[in-house]
Image (cartoon, rainbow, N blue to C red):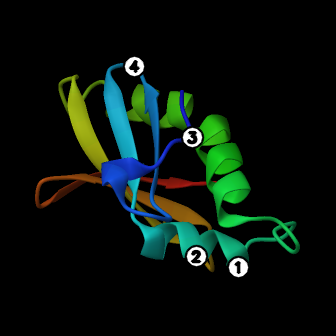
Amino acid sequence: MTGGLGDGLPGAAEGEAGGYLFRMSPVEVAKLRELAGSRGRTDEDLSADFLKSQTVRWAESLAGVLPAPADVRVIVDPYSRQAFLASGRTVFSILSF
């Protein structure tokens, strides 16, 4: 797993697990500021910790529905505490965090 910048965009982040590359755009990373415990932390720290804590579980949930390797977009809803995992135009999984 990594917490690097996804797509080379400032503020984007990515993590890898199980052959899946999970990418968060800067807009999605910014949504992490709405989560409890985010106050005073940088977007880079928030996204790195978030991806580190979630990517293995996300990879396990995708294993039966999306063949690896695959790029997966992560869409965050901080209010319902759900992550939508999409590839192409299809949402393959919705998981609470």
Q: Nearer the viewer, mark 2 or mark 3?
A: 3
Quickly name the residue at label 2: 31
Q: Earlier in the sequence, mark 1 or mark 3?
A: 3
What is the spatial separation of the Cα atoms under label 4 and label 2, in whole angstroms?
A: 25 Å
Quickly name the residue at label 1: 34
Quickly name the residue at label 4: 18
Residue drawn at 30 percent across, 51 percent down: 7
Q: Earlier in the sequence, mark 4 or mark 1?
A: 4
Q: Mark on residue 3?
A: 3
The amino acid beneath tag 1 is Glu
Horizontal side, residue 88 vs residue 86: left or right? left
What is the spatial separation of the Cα atoms under label 2 and label 3, in whole angstroms?
A: 16 Å
Q: Nearer the viewer, mark 3 or mark 4?
A: 3
Q: Earlier in the sequence, mark 4 or mark 2?
A: 4
Q: Earlier in the sequence, mark 3 or mark 4?
A: 3
What is the spatial separation of the Cα atoms under label 2 and label 1, in whole angstroms?
A: 6 Å
